[in-house]
Image (tube, coloured by chain):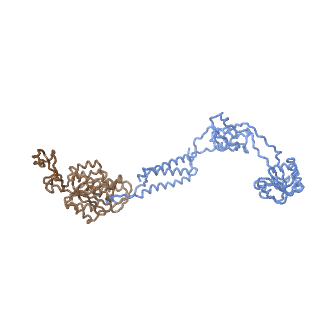
Chain colours: A brown, B blue
Amino acid sequence: MPPHAPIAIPADVRSRLKALRLLPRGARGAHGIGLHASRSRGAGLEFAQYRAYEPGDELRQIDWKLYARSDRFFVRESERESPITTWVLIDATASAAQHDRARPQWSRLDQACATTACLVELALQQGDRFGVIAVNGDGVQLVPAASGPRQRDRVHLLLRQLQAQGSWPAVDVLRPVWERVQAGDLLVALGDGFDEAGTVLLERLAAARREVLQLQLLSADERDFPFTDGHRFRDPETGEELLGDGRALRADYLARFGQAQHALQARLHASGIAHAVGYMDQPLDAPLRLLFGPGSGA
Amino acid sequence: MNLALLFPLGLLALAAWLVPLLVHLARRQQYAPLEFAALRWLRARVRPRQRVRFDEWPLLLLRLLLLAALALLLARPILQGSAPDTRAVIAVAPGLDAAALRAQQPEADWRWLAPGFASTDTPAPPAAQPLTSLLRELDQTLPAGAPLTVYVPDPLTGADAQRPRLSRPVQWRPIARTAPAAPDASSSAPRLRLGGAADAPARRVLDAVQRAWSGQPLAAATDAAPVQGEIGVWVSAAPLPPTWQAWLEGGGTVLVTQAGTRAPAETVVLRDAQGQAAISERRVGQGRLLRVHGALSPSALPLLEDPAFPRQLLTLARPPAAPQWVAAATHAPLTGADAPAPQPLDLAPWLLGLIVLLFAMERWLATSARRGAQA
């Protein structure tokens, strides 16, 4: 695949994406107009076009003066002007290079980039503004929020160049996040959720009225721990190594990992951060349906 | 039917089992580093392994089998007590018409009585063979109980000093053939070649000997070396000239007169009536040196007056040929020899085949793509 080609989204995933909506909870009624979806076609906004009435359109949207002139029902449509900006925060630290043994060419970063591509499609579908922030050892790389297909290309260009390296940067390096992500914006964090500093950042963003969702991407190996032989396990971020036998370590690891996941969920829940877990052997949209699907509560 | 090892120390090669065992063990020790981001939830606890484990069991097993087969090959296994082949064997001496004889009994095991005991389907080996010796060998090679029939020419050649004694009764079938005529002994009597400075009595004695042998007078003395069919006579105190010495070492026979004590390499071959040594013999190179103790005169050597002396000297100078022909009917083998030891079956060719097969399987397993994907 050439390095600048757009990230491919499988056709079945793309078709299922149509059922999803990026709906922020906090933005609901923020400007006193109503649902996020209704804002784009409200009265008083900038005129865009007339279109023929279709069953299901609200009666108050019908332009009665035009009806008087033409004896036909027309609906007045406005230029869509979404107040919602969607941000995707990608954790591209060295731990994002983790891959499953069953699928060695597909890393957590690949999964994150593909998920970002899905989110971008969703935002584009809704006409929302969107931007991407990637965090790795080098600092912060970002694509400022904008809308339209060319913005999608800019995002894909960034995703293509993204390398998983380093560890979570210091707080002052993360200042662009605070500068760009405004209050009321939707921010979807993609990553393994293993970095304590990353979780702290999400908590502080949520406390500062950003609409934060965390989509935790875990490999199947982290979930199942299928190792049966002796291995030298190595942490890609700290370089720490541990020699151990897979069978002997498995039960203890699964218990402790499950405990840590529960603790993380409780913490995020307390901060009002929606949380979903996506596994790398599942379809891309499975965690997205949990967060943005019908009946998700979001 | 039991297995025996001719060289049991070869099994020490089984120590080579250590190598594949170590190879398959050692791989476990060097763990491949595995990136694992969730390391912080792993607790360092390397339990001591309860039992030794090996990688790639089938390959290890195959390698051990291969080494075991090689060690067994070094130990030279034989299989004793396998069922003997007691078919009737018919041996034909080379020179006889095996095809015509075979027509009488075509289903038997026909073999040439020649080294290797090949089937009579193969071309006939040379006719001159030590038949009696071969017969003994064949008797010991065949398993006990196999009836043996032997076709030999009559008269028989290639016999040795005694009638063969075999372990089994043999059907002895002489086939008459014409014997070649014996050569005339008188025509080939040797001539004396006189050299050195012989005095008159010695010349008389030698002339008489020569006349007794062939009826011819003695040739004149000359220093030229003797030729084939001649016996050199060097009557002089001087040593042999180089040409004579060379002829002697090349296989000739030279008679010298020299008194004195016996050299260690000499053997006395003729004594007189009183038991005194008269002529002794010594081998020089391939030839023989006959030394007359004393001068060649009747006064010094009374034996010369014996009428039998020329014949005795002829026997010494040219020993009569050993008999070569024997009537086949009188040379039928006797029985009573020890029964042949049962021939053990040598397992080396089978083992070699097994080793080649195992090696091919080992290579196939070790280089298969499936294994590379695992590693």
Give percent across and percent down for residue A157: 30, 57
Query: Which quadrant of the rendered structure holds the N terminus of chain B?
Result: top right
Query: Which quadrant of the rendered structure holds the C terminus of chain B?
Result: bottom left
Q: Residue furthest front?
A: A69
Q: Nearer the viewer, residue A224 or B263?
A: A224
Picture mark count = 0
Give percent across and percent down for residue B32: 39, 57
The residue located at (58%, 45%) in the rendering is B345
Using the image, determine if residue B97 lies above or below residue B261. above
Toward which corner of the image does residue B282 lie, by quadrant?
A: bottom right
Give percent across and percent down for residue B160: 72, 45
Q: Nearer the viewer, residue B239 or A91?
A: A91
- Horizontal side of B125 relative to A202 (left or right) equals right
In this rendering, does residue A251 appear at all?
A: no
Q: Nearer the viewer, residue B318 or A11?
A: A11
In this rendering, does residue B352 appear at all?
A: yes
Give percent across and percent down for residue B261: 81, 59
